[in-house]
Amino acid sequence: MYKMIVCDLDETLMNDDGSLSEKNVAAIKAATAKGVHFVPNSGRSYTSFQNDLEKMNLRDQPNEYSISYNGGLVLENKDNRPLIVNAMPFDVAKSVFEIGAANKKAATHVYTQDKLYIFNPATDDSMYLKNRGVSFSTMTTPDFDQFEGQNIMKVIMALETIDERKEMRKDVEEQVDPSKLAVTFSSGRYVEFNPSGIDKGSAAIQLGESLNIKPEEIIAAGDNSNDLSMLKVVGLPVSVANGIDSVKAVAKYVTEADNNHDALAEVINKFIL
């Protein structure tokens, strides 16, 4: 019996326009009514999906949970209470940011525990965020020292092509010890830097342990490379139909539907209800 579903948001649960379908909402409500935890496991900040939690009847609820920043933060939804904080060391985050900020093609994002700041924002990226309810403040100067004393959850760069994103990863790893970083790609636009050992999978297992839920009792659903870590450690790894090839390769189930056609409802109806 599966006791928890950890689910990516963008391009997995959400439609391409950032909306949440009624069929997915209904299926999630039915699953939680049976006592199954539905846990968003996103690279985004928890602040950006509160309205979606509201639709699922999960907002501000005790004994319901969310994972943000690719595993950087685990929260109980009631009062958004932090349970686990996996922040980046300040010097590592600063070095990664400065490499991104030096690239004029990159929109460089800094996620603190509660806010998003972007240096050199790009119009397309800003519209993508807006459609998903993500608000941010623009950094007018590349002064990273303003974040000293704050929890830095991750630093990411938006770049147009996969070659540019791979080159950014190479640039960072030439100057920052790769053993201090967890690097992933997401949403066909981002290269993401978290602290080493922190990813969606580690956070899912941490949360499961705190709830006495075994890895084999967890379903994980995703579509992109930053989801691989959670797919590899759970009992039932799922790729939506629009998942990339490497995600489909590790999945035990690939949905017939894509993210625009209620893929999560398909999973819940097949394995939970």
Image (tube, grey):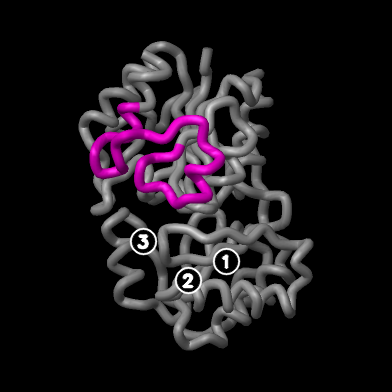
Of the 4 image quadrants, the one containing the C terminus is top left
Residue at 61% across, 63% down: 193
**For numbered disc 2, what is the local secondary structure?**
helix
What is the x, y in percent for residue 129? 34, 62
- Mark 1, other Cα within 10 Å: few <14 / some 14–19 / many ≥20: many
Query: Relative to the observer, which residue lies in front, 227 or 244?
Result: 244
Q: Amino acid at mark 2?
A: Ile
Please give the range of residues in magenta.
Answer: 239-266
Query: Relative to the observer, which residue lies in front, 23 or 47?
Result: 23
Question: Is 217 located above or below residue 263 in the figure?
Answer: above
Q: Nearer the viewer, mark 2 or mark 3?
A: 2
What is the x, y in percent for residue 209? 68, 26
Question: Is 53 located above or below residue 198 in the figure?
Answer: above
Query: Relative to the observer, which residue lies in front, 130 or 253?
Result: 253
Q: Amino acid at mark 1?
A: Val
Asked where in the image residue 136 lies, by quadrant, the reply is bottom left
Mark 2 lies on residue: 162
The CA span between labels 2 and 3 is: 25 Å
Mark 3 lies on residue: 135
Q: Amino acid at mark 3?
A: Ser
**For numbered disc 1, what is the local secondary structure?**
strand
Asked where in the image residue 254 lies, by quadrant, the reply is top left
Q: Is residue 102 magenta?
A: no
The CA span between labels 2 and 1 is: 17 Å
Question: Is 12 located above or below residue 78 in the figure?
Answer: below
